[in-house]
Image: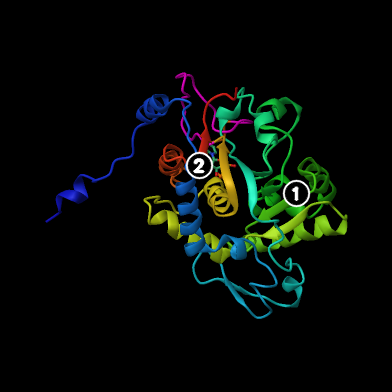
Amino acid sequence: VLCWFYIYPVYRLPRDKEIVEEVLRQGEVWQKNQTGIDLYRKLLTDCCDPRRMFAVTKENSPMGKVLWYDGEFYHSHTVNNETYSLFVQDNPLQLPLKKCAVVGNGGILRHSRCGQHIDQADFIMRCNLPPLSKEYVEDVGTKTHLVTANPSIIEKRFQNLLWSRKAFVDSMKVYGSSYIYMPAFSMKPGTDPSLRAYYALSDTSSNLTMLFANPEFLRTVGKFWKARGVHAKRLSTGLFLVSLALGLCEEVTAYGFWPFSVGLDEQPVSHHYYDNILPYKWFHAMPEEFVQLWHLHKSGTLHMRVGHCP
Ligand code: CDP
C-alpha cells in the first residue's frame, strides 16, 4: 500500500509567482546579523573546512594521495609527480576576506546598474568565465578576484585547447590577475582539459593563477546543502561559491541569482545576463537553492541583490 506521503509530498516548492510575491513583501530591507554570519561560518567550517580544503594544495594533497572524483562513482586520481607540481603550496588567499561579492549569471543583472556596487567589494567571485565586455560593465562591473571555469567550457568554447591556446589566453585577460578555479577532479573527462588550461596559462606567463577545486570540499558542501533540502544531482556553481564566501568572508553580497522566468516587475527575464540558453532541466535545482539563499537573506546572514542597485 502506498503511504500518503508518497502521493502528497510534505514539502512543495513555491511557484515562481509566489516567490516574486514573497521577495516583494520583503522589499529592499536587509539587516546584517552578525550572529547569523558567525553561525554559518562555524557550520561551514565544521562540515567542509573551506580555509584548508577549497583548493587542491600540496599541503592537503601530497604525493600518493587518492583524490576521489566527486561528480561520479569509483573514479579517482592518485597524485603523482606531474600533478603534484601543478598544485599551489597552500591556501593562497589572504584571510579573512572582508566584503565579498558573489556574482551569478542570472538575467536579472541586465539593466541592474550593479557594476559599481560589485566593483567596490574587496573580493569578487564570478562563475563560468562570464563575458565582461563593455556592454555589460555598468551592470556587472569589471573586477574579478576568482572566476570558475568548467572543463566543458574549455572543450566547447576553446576546442579543448588543441589549436586555440592563444584565443583562450587572450580571452582570459579580462579577469586580470585573478584565480581561475577549475573542478579538474570532479568528472574524469574534465581532468585533461583542466590540465591543458593550466599549461596554456603557465606557458604564456599569464597573470592568472590556476586553482583546482578540491573534490573532497565539493562533496562535503554538497552534503551540507542536501541536509538542508537541496535535492539536485549537483549543486550549481553559484551555490558552491556562496558557500565558499560564507566560510571565508566577513560579509557576503550575492548578485545575479534569479532562476525564474519573470522578474519583480512581472516582465520576462532571460536565464543569463548575456543569453537565454537554459540549463539541463533536472541537473541543478536552482529554484530550491534560491529558497535556501533567500532564508539566509531574511536572517541577515547573506545579502541577496535581486533588484536594481541604487
Ligand atoms: O553552470 P551553471 O548552470 O551552474 O551556471 P551559470 O548558468 O553559468 O550561472 C552561474 C550561477 O548563477 C549558477 O550556478 C546559479 O547559481 C546562478 N544563476 C541563478 O541563480 N539564476 C539564473 N537565472 C542563472 C544563474
| Residue nearer the viewer, 45 or 110 | 45
Residue at 43% over, 38% down: 294
Could you say which disc has been placed on residue 178 in the image? 1
Residue drawn at (73%, 73%), measured in percent from left and top? 84
Q: Is residue 81 left or right of residue 47?
A: right
Circle 2 sits on which residue?
302
Q: Residues within 10 Å of mark 2 (few under 14, many from 20)?
A: many
Q: Residue furthest right?
A: 204
Residue 122 drawn at (x, y percent): 69, 43
Can see residue 170?
A: yes
Q: Could you tell me which residue is drawn at 57 percent across and 53 percent down?
A: 244
Q: Residue at x 38, y 31 (%)?
A: 19
Where does the image place residue 101, in percent across and percent down from the top left? 62, 41
Relative height, residue 67 to residue 251 (above, below) = below
Q: How many marks?
A: 2
Q: Which secondary structure is most common in the magenta stretch?
A: loop
For the residue pair 40 and 236, the one nearer the viewer reads as 40
Q: Could you say whether the residue bearing mark 2 is in a helix, strand or loop?
A: loop
The location of residue 52, given as percent across then percent down, is 61, 65
Residue 202 in which image quadrant: bottom right
Inspect the magenta stretch and tell me whether residue 262 lies in it: yes
Q: Which residues are magenta?
A: 257-275
